[in-house]
Image (spheres, rainbow, N blue to C red):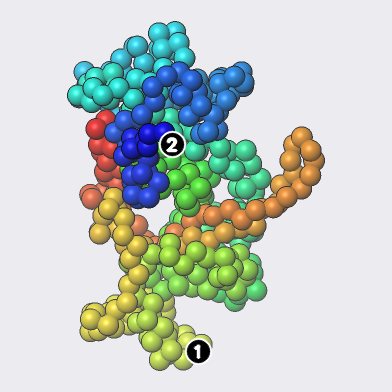
Amino acid sequence: MKLNLEFDPETFHSLIGGRAVIETPRLNLKSKDEARAYLKSYGYDTDVEADREKLWQIHSRAVIYIRTQLLQEGESVPEELSDPKQLSDISNLLLIASMRDSSQGSLHSWACALLRVMHVISQLHNDLFNYFSLEIQEEIFRPYRQFVQKDAVSGIRLAGGSDEDVIPLQKFDIKPFKDSDSAITKLLAKPDEVAFGLLDKIGVRFVTATLFDVFRVMRFLVNNHVVSPANVIPNQSNNTLFPANLFLEVVEGLPRLTDMPVSEVDKVLNERLAVEAERARFLEKHNSFTSRDYRFIKFITRQLVRVTHPETQKSFSFFYPYEVQILDYEHYLRSLSGPASHDEYKARQRARARQRVLV
């Protein structure tokens, strides 16, 4: 019996080489049976009609995404791959992606591009949020709605809890869910992201009038049990707004209760930072798409969500992550234009997604 020394390098790059699967340059499938077995191990059985329908839905969504989000003028996905009638069978897409012709614009290159986007869409479609979005949003946002008050006289404020503070807000935004194009782009742009690691799919954002109020908001959320520090994911926290160590030193040096206006506290904070900048301990989680001009505080926490399965009527629970972002009005205004703007951030992500998909 002869020893088989044929090994597929791409397999080992994915398993133990640390390379994201969407960066694989080609598959290594030689027949329809192999392609269908590959799909079955991935999670879709082509002998099952419901799975075939789901695969075609994912294929259609991928074609639309590439056309609307990634292509430039004059570019188009070949009809041999985008038209289900011409492609005939999803397994054919995998076989074309296994071809050795990797020249730019070849059917092989386009097949790989489609499969990269299909992979991300499949991950998103099978996330818990896709099935329980209403329940998840209700559990997460209910406590915030309880304490964020709005009226024509006082405007927006955080109030009504056990905390004695009443904190005026310039803005309060609920991000109900990351729309699918945005989620697809983010997963394509970041090699280490997968759907279950997309921790900011939903969230809230506070914009305060002053810098000091940013820290008051955090205290309010904890004191009124809207946020549990035990559920925060430590390595996802970000603070580029004001160093926590200097903030705590300043407030510890002031009377516990004071008649000092908030604007004066802000002045003391900024003066301390100017004098002791070398001691400032910011916490920056690197994001190549976020401009350094965008200064904010962010943390990811989790909410225990209880749902009832619609078919079995059995209840079960799971933790679901969401983002809390807080910044003051001055830095919010800076984020509306220039490199720190949201539009520029998204443009950088789309450019990176295009680069990874249309290699």
**Which residue appears farthest toward the right when viewing the image?**
313
Does residue 109 appear anywhere in the picture? yes
> Which residue is found at the position 33% from the left and 35% from the top?
6
Helix or strand or loop: what does disc 1 sit on?
A: loop
Mark 2 burial class by Cα count in 10 Å: few <14, some 14-19, many 20+: many
The residue that disc 2 covers is 120
Q: Which mark is nearer the camera, 2 or 1? A: 2
> Measured along the vertical axis of the image, is residue 320 above or below residue 89?
below
Q: Nearer the viewer, residue 337 or 56?
A: 56
Residue wearing tag 1:
256
Residue at x 28% of width, y 37% of height: 356
Which residue is nearer to you in this view: 108 or 68?
Answer: 108
The residue drawn where x is 54% and y is 29% is 40
Q: Position of residue 166 (x, y in %)?
A: 55, 70
Choose between 245 and 334: the one closer to the eye.
245
Question: What's the amino acid at mark 1?
Answer: Arg
Instruction: Identify the residue at image location x=53%, y=33%.
Output: 41
Q: Secondary structure at mark 2?
A: helix
Between 310 and 159, the one nearer to me in the picture: 310
Left-right relation of 317 to 75:
right
Check the picture and name the quadrant holding the N terminus.
top left
Query: Quadrant location of residue 24?
Result: top left
Whether residue 206 is visible, yes or no, is no
Q: Horizontal placement of 139 versus 289: left or right?
A: right
User: Residue 51, image x and y in percent?
Assistant: 58, 24
Q: Is residue 256 above or below residue 340?
A: below
Q: Quadrant of the C terminus?
A: top left
Name the kind of residue labelled 2 in the image: Val
- Marks 2 and 1, how far apart at CA: 51 Å
